[in-house]
Amino acid sequence: MTGLVLTVVLCFSLASLADQQKPIDPSRELQNLVYYPHANEVSFTSSYQSSLNEVGPTINAAGNESRATSTLYNEIPVTLTYGVVDRIRLSISQTYLLQQSLTDTSTASGNVTVLNASGPSSPTYSVIWRAMQDQQYFLDLNFSTTPQNGTRLAETADQSGNNLVAMSTSSLTAIFYFYFGDEEVEIEPAAQYHSTGMTQGSVSTSNTIYPTQFVSGSLTLAERSHVGKKFYVEPILLVTLPYDYTYVTQSTGALATVSLNMTLNPELQIGYLPTRWCLLTFGVAFTSTNYNTNQAPSTASLTIDYDSSTSFGARFIF
């Protein structure tokens, strides 16, 4: 009888030791970059983001300044992700916009006009496949599409704007992760395809038409440093590659070409994990975009666009 008891105790001890030695799957830990919802799991992410956008002044070919625009706006982005099977998940994202634009014309009369826009964005649908996974190296392939599901309204003195896209967009992203325990690295090249589209003004002659398709690209670099099991600090750098697009203002019928230069957009995010199913985040970001608009040599202009934002967010798993 004593031998039987010892045998049972030994079996349980060996099983417990085996469980302790079994490597932890980092893709199941919510605070990790490599986390994703596995089969039948749901992830819900939302945040509150406040941003200040400064555009201009615009400098024309003669060196004269035209106007500067300041926009303070608030957004609530929401993403819902479902693990269909292991390594494959589906997600839908949408952003609700509250916006107020203060336009300051710094030449001529110097008028100040308050413009408003609000409402939900066009939803983005994504399919993500965890193509490679081991204890250190991971790869996600992400196909996303944002269809044009309504008319994009421009905010003007005569109408409120909305948050719908002016043209449909599809993107393909490869996300490489390198996991070293307390340190994680993400390298994320992406390519976006933009279709034709239109932004509707308050009258038909003020519509803006985008008559040609174009492709843009970006590269995201991130390093997440964990401080214990609860906190992390993550610097992020978004590199937007140069690209061109064209538009036509219906009132003049003139074709304009916009050339965007390469931009470096830094961001800093801090995360806190109060429980295994809830992650809280705080982030600050800055964006600077330089672009040239050319309708003819005499109307060429350079615009500098600055955007700074802060956000508070949360992510839950079920």
Image (cartoon, rainbow, N blue to C red):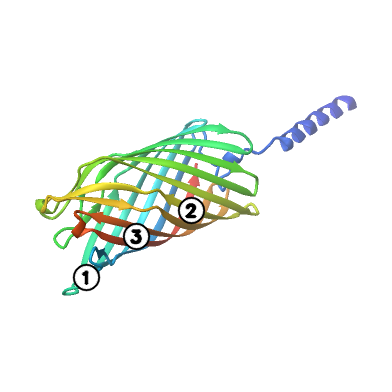
Give left or right: position of 12 versus 274. right
Between the C-alphas of marks 1 and 3, the distance is 23 Å
**Compared to 85, does 240 lie above or below?**
below
Q: Position of residue 191 (x, y in %)?
A: 39, 40
**Compared to 129, does 121 lie above or below?**
below
Tell me the element at label 3. Answer: strand
Q: Position of residue 18 (x, y in %)?
A: 74, 33
Q: Which mark is residue 237?
A: 2
Residue 149 in view: no
Give left or right: position of 25 versus 68. right
Between the C-alphas of marks 2 and 1, the distance is 33 Å
Q: Amino acid at mark 1?
A: Thr
Residue annotated with mark 1: 105
Nearer to us in this view, 56 or 185? 56
Q: Residue furthest bottom?
A: 109
Q: Amino acid at mark 3?
A: Asn
Q: Nearer the viewer, mark 2 or mark 3?
A: 2
Q: From the image, which quarter does the N terminus lie in?
A: top right
Residue 76 in view: yes
Of label 2 and label 1, which has the lower sequence position? 1
Asked if the residue at tag 3 contacts the one at tag 1, i.e. Cβ–Cβ closer than 8 Å, the answer is: no
Residue annotated with mark 3: 74
Q: Position of residue 315 (x, y in %)?
A: 48, 49
Tell me the element at label 2. Answer: strand
